[in-house]
Image: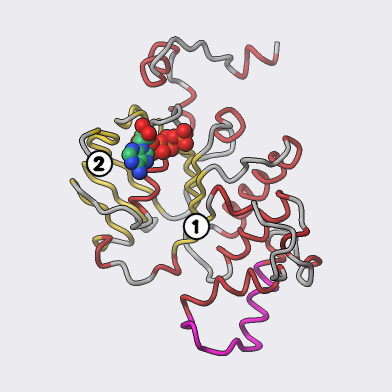
């Protein structure tokens, strides 16, 4: 049976006196590809910050790999790529190789020397995202989409079980957005890496994801992609907070 990576139980969160998340449940298992979707301000980033331990759990429980998040030791198992990863100044003094290798620092400790084996890991990670030919290039001189791939490689270098991404395609053009999602799909299918992706590109991603979570302060729906496709306009509108009429794939094809 697939191992449970994340188990969120009855989690609520408030900033000052404003409720942002209420009674959230979500379970993510090995190898699953989750799209976390919701309107602006629905609490997606807050949930991700709670999962990454960047915000304290105020109410409810979050478990990683079967242990309470407060006792999480093996952070290398969690790869994280933030929204702003691809916003490097062109004079930033690091090569793609160095940026990816820095993903090994938490595993090795700040003052350890890098070994030949580490070098191999960096090239393997770069190959996974088809960026090995850019290893020697300065990170600031790559396009936004290429930088984003380099940051995925950085997250992959410690061989995590899951990649968490908060709107990773901001600032990337449409053609490259599609290629980016193809890459995630391939990492998920071929490498078995679980993915939890916050996105506004709902149609594109929900067709690739195996599971979908619809958040708007509460979790309106979480489940398999096929069940998600069955949600009717009324359920969808209730979640989004205003009337929505979805164009179903079959209708669009006519
Ligand atoms: N540090 C903070 N202090 C106070 N309120 C905050 C803070 N961060 C976020 N919020 C509020 O919490 C709510 C949820 O924000 P969050 O960023 O989690 O939503 P989101 O779904 O990720 O939004 P978006 O899609 O616009 O990025 C919003 O109303 C936001 O204004």
Q: Quadrant of ligand 1?
A: top left
> Between residues 242 and 188, which one lies in front from this camera angle?
242
Instruction: Check residue 31 in the rendering and tell me which mark sits there, or answer none.
Output: none
**Element at badge 2?**
strand
Query: How would you rate the neighbour count of disc 2 (Cα within 10 Å): few for under 14, some for 14-19, many for 20 or more?
Result: many
Horizontal relation, residue 45 to residue 122: left or right: left
Q: Position of residue 4 (x, y in %)?
A: 35, 55
Picture residue at 53% right of the left edge, 39% below the top: 209
Residue 123: within the magenta? Answer: yes
SS under mark 1: strand
The residue labelled by disc 1 is: 80
The alpha-carbon separation of the residues under discs 2 and 1 comes to 21 Å
Label whose residue precedes the other's in the sequence (2 or 1): 2
Specify the segment rendered in magenta.
108-125
Residue 212 in view in this figure = no
> Residue at the spot x=53%, y=71% of the render?
158
**Between tags 2 and 1, which lies in front?**
2
Q: Nearer the viewer, residue 170 or 60?
A: 170
Q: Indicate if the residue with disc 1 has its beta carbon within 8 Å of ligand 1.
A: no
Q: Position of residue 188 (x, y in %)?
A: 57, 52
Kindly tell me whether residue 84 is visible in this rendering: yes
Residue to which mark 2 is pinned: 13
Hey, which quadrant is residue 128 in on the image?
Answer: bottom right
Classify 171 as above or below 89.
Answer: above
Q: In percent of the image, x 76 and y 37: which residue is there?
A: 175
The image quadrant where one finds the N terminus is bottom left
Question: Mark 1: few, some, or many residues within 10 Å (few <14, many ≥20)?
Answer: many
Residue 17 location in percent, x, y? 20, 35
Residue depicted at x 53% and y 14%: 246
Residue 103 in magenta stretch = no
Q: Locate the C terminus and report the quarter of the image it occupies.
A: top right
Q: In the rendered view, does 201 fall on the left or right side of 31?
A: right
């Amino acid at each position: 049976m697939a191992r449970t990576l994340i188990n969120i139980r009855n989690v609520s969160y408030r900033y000052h006196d404003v409720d942002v998340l209420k009674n959230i449940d979500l379970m993510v298992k090995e190898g699953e590809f989750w799209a976390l979707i919701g309107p602006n301000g629905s609490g997606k980033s807050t949930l991700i910050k709670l999962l990454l331990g960047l915000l304290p759990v105020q109410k409810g429980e979050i478990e990683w790999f079967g242990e309470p998040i407060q006792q999480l030791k093996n952070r290398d198992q969690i790869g994280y790529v933030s929204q702003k990863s691809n916003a490097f100044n062109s004079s930033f003094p690091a090569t793609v190789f160095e940026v990816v290798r820095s993903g090994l620092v938490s595993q090795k400790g700040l003052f350890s020397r890098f070994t030949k084996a580490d070098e191999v890991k960096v090239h393997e990670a770069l190959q996974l995202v088809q960026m090995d030919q850019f290893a020697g290039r300065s990170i600031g001189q790559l396009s936004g989409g290429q930088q984003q791939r380099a940051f995925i490689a950085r997250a992959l270098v410690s061989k995590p079980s899951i990649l968490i991404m908060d709107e990773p395609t901001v600032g990337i053009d449409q053609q490259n957005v599609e290629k980016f999602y193809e890459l995630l799909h391939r990492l998920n299918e071929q490498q078995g890496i679980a993915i939890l992706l916050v996105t506004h590109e709902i149609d594109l991603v929900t067709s690739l994801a195996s599971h979908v979570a619809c958040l708007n302060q509460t979790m309106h729906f979480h489940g398999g992609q096929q069940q998600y496709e069955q949600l009717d306009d009324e359920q969808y509108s209730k979640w989004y907070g205003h009337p929505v009429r979805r164009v179903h794939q079959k209708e669009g094809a006519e």
